[in-house]
Amino acid sequence: MRRLFAGLVEQTFCTEVGLCDPALTSYLSDLLVDFTHVDRLSAIRRFSGQKLEHLAALLIALSDELPEDETERDRTLYRNIGDFALFWTGVYPEHLRREQGSRDVLHDYVDQGKRSYAIVSELVGENERPPGRLFRQLSEEFEYCAYGLGLVRREWEHTRPPHGAGPDLVY
């Protein structure tokens, strides 16, 4: 799974988005892999399209335990918010679109994702992994990253294994 996402992200971001930064594409590949885990997907389904105030409940559902250290807790919390917002706006934005009579939360998710990554960039040193500059880049280029993740989704939805490389789906 990781190799599939890494290849799709690198190809898409370098050729179509114009962001050919190995640290960025590696982070985004890991983000996609992380969101394939069942516990994260079930939490995402429960909170899909809901307002930002529900992100706190989502983070509790996604985090086994937040660190006791306040700075580390803030880094973890804001990184999770940024990751969730980027994944959702990039991969499944149609679930954030306005329903009749309700507010469009897509823009809220973009704003909150950018803000959260900017906060993380101030809390993470340059010698840490991933470094603060990566989170600054995620904040500043959030819309490009979301757009690129949407292109990656389009690619994986149209990717089929070579004949004989895997089971054929029956349905």
Image: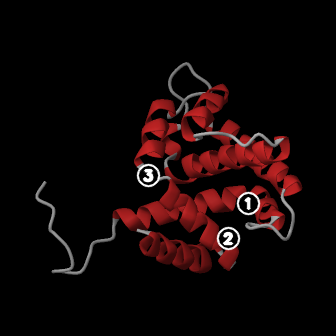
- Mark before the other along the chain sequence, 2 or 1: 2
Q: Residue at x 62, y 36 (%)?
A: 59
Q: Residues within 10 Å of mark 3 (few under 14, many from 20)?
A: few
Numbered label attached to residue 37:
3
Name the quadrant containing residue 102. Answer: top right
Q: Do the residues labelled 2 and 1 touch (CB within 8 Å)?
A: yes
Amino acid type for the residue under numbered disc 2: Leu
- Mark before the other along the chain sequence, 2 or 3: 2
Q: Seen in the image, is 158 located left or right of residue 147?
A: left
Pinpoint residue 95: horizontal percent, then vertical percent: 49, 38
Amino acid type for the residue under numbered disc 1: Leu
Q: Which of 146 and 161 is in front in this view?
A: 161
Q: Is mark 2 on a helix, strand or loop?
A: helix
* Vertical position of residue 118 compared to residue 163: above or below: above
Does the image show residue 19? no
Q: Distance between the residues labelled 1 and 3?
A: 22 Å
Q: Which of 99 and 3 is in front in this view?
A: 3
Q: Seen in the image, is 50 located left or right of residue 128?
A: left
The N terminus, quarter of image: bottom left
* Vertical position of residue 170 compared to residue 10: above or below: above
Q: Name the residue under label 1.
A: 138
Q: How far apart are marks 2 and 3 (CA)?
A: 21 Å
Q: Distance between the residues labelled 2 and 1?
A: 8 Å
Numbered label attached to residue 117:
none
Pinpoint residue 35: horizontal percent, then vertical percent: 49, 52
Q: Is mark 3 on a helix, strand or loop?
A: loop
- Mark before the other along the chain sequence, 1 or 3: 3
Q: Which residue is drawn at 44% across and 43% down?
A: 39
Q: Name the residue under label 2.
A: 24
